[in-house]
Image: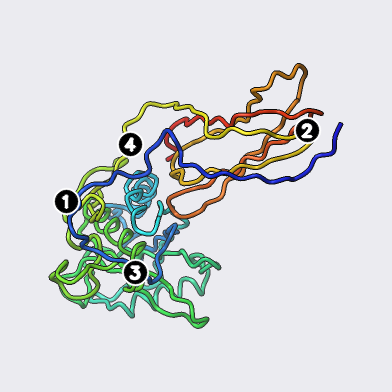
Amino acid sequence: MATRNSDVAVTARQPVAIDVASVGGGAPAKFSDNGGAVIQIPRVILLYWGSAWTATPAPVPTSAAITNAVRAMLASAYMTGLAEYRQIGRGHLVASAVHTATNPPTSFTDQNVADFVAARIADGTVPGLDQFNQNLYVVVMPTGVGSSGGSFIGEHTYYTDGAGKRVRFAWITNNGTLTSLTSIISHEIVEAATDPEGSAILGVTGTCSQGGWCEIADICSTTAIRNGVTVQSFWSDQASSCVIPDWPRRRFPQTGVQFRGTVAAGRSHRWFTFNWPEYLHVRWRAVPVTQLPGAAEITWRTQIERASGAFVTYWISVTNLTARDVDIEGRYTILGISS
C-alpha cells in the first residue's frame, strides 16, 4: 500500500441548500459600524442580587423561572438576526447565581452594580473573564428596586478591572412579571452584543431621540414569543425594519453535493466549505464515484471551525487507501436546526 501524504487541496463554496440571510429594504442605513468591540458569542452570566430572591413565599417570578427562560431564549432563533452586524451569533448561558449576603440600594447606580459584579467575580460566585472576553454579566434586581438614573428599566455598560480588561455588564429592574423581565433582558443582550462599549454598532445622526448610546433595540418596541419566551424586536438594516428572527421554514433533511475532486493513490486531500449558519445540524460524507471493488477504500474526517459568531467552516479530509486515483464527492445532509 502506498504511503499516505497530507497533500492539502482546498476549495470554498457557499452552501447550496440554505440561504444565509434575507436581504430587503433598500432604505438608507440607520446604523453604522464604528469599529469598536463587539461580543461575537455572548457568554451570559445571570446574577440575582438580594435576600428577596430566597424569601418565603417565593418571589414571582422566581430566579429559576427567569434562568430557564433566558436559557430558552438564547437557544432560540432570536439572536440569529445579529449575523448582519459583523457576524455576531447566538449566545449561551454559562452560569447563574443568587447572592443574598447583601442587598442592592433602593436607588442604585451603575457603580453599585459594577462593584457588585467585581466582588462576585473575586469571591468565585461567578466565572471571571477568559482570554476571549465574551462574558456578559446580567444583574437582575428584586422588585421595589430602581435605578438612580430615573426612568431607565435596564442598561448595559462596562467597567475596567485591575488587569485593564473591560468587564461588560447589564442590570435589569423587575416589575414582578416574567414577560417584562425577558423583554428587557433580550433588549440588553442584543445591544450589549453589538455595542458593549459604545463604540461599535451605533445609530447614524437622527436615528435616536434619547440621550446616550443609540443602539439597535432603542428604536423598536414590539415583542413576540420565541421558544416560549417574550423577546423584544431590534433593528435590521438589511430588512429596513424592526425584526424578531425565527427559524427558516424548511423541510429537513436536505441533501446535496458540495464538492467533487480526485484523491491520488495513497494520498490525502482536504476541502473546506464556509458560511454555514452555526445553528444547522450538518453531516458530511465522502463517497467514491470511481468503481473500486473491495472494502475500506477511502476514509474521511470532518473538522469544524467556528469562523465567527454566526457561521462555521467545515474541513473535510479524505484519504485514499488504494493504489489508484479515486474520484470522490463531498455530500452533505442537513438534518435540521440544532437549537
Identify the residue position indicated by label 1 in the image. 222
Quick one: label 2 or label 3, which is nearer the N terminus? 3
Task: Return the mark for residue 177.
Answer: none
| Dot 2 amino acid type | Ala
Quick one: label 4 or label 3, which is nearer the N terminus? 3
Quick one: label 1 or label 3, which is nearer the N terminus? 3
Identify the residue position indicated by label 3 in the image. 200
Q: Secondary structure at mark 4?
A: loop
- Foreground pick, 263 / 226: 263
Quick one: label 2 or label 4, which is nearer the N terminus? 4
Quick one: label 2 or label 1, which is nearer the N terminus? 1
Identify the residue position indicated by label 2 in the image. 265
Quick one: label 4 or label 1, which is nearer the N terminus? 1
Image position of 141 (left or right of 131) = left
Q: Secondary structure at mark 3?
A: loop
Q: How far, Cα to Cα, is label 2 from label 3?
A: 51 Å
Q: How far, Cα to Cα, is label 4 from label 3?
A: 28 Å
| Dot 4 amino acid type | Pro
Task: Return the mark for residue 248.
Answer: 4
Q: Secondary structure at mark 1?
A: loop
Label 3 Cα crowd, 10 Å radius (few <14 / some 14-19 / many 20+): many
Horizontal and vertical percent for residue 51? 34, 66
Horizontal and vertical percent for residue 147? 22, 73
- Foreground pick, 197 / 298: 298
Label 4 Cα crowd, 10 Å radius (few <14 / some 14-19 / many 20+): few
- Foreground pick, 187 / 286: 286
Q: Examine the rendered structure and indicate whether residue 146 appears above or below residue 332.
A: below
Q: Which callout, 4 or 1, points to the residue nearer the camera?
A: 4
- Quarter of the image for residue 331 reads top right
Q: Which callout, 2 or 1, points to the residue nearer the camera?
A: 2
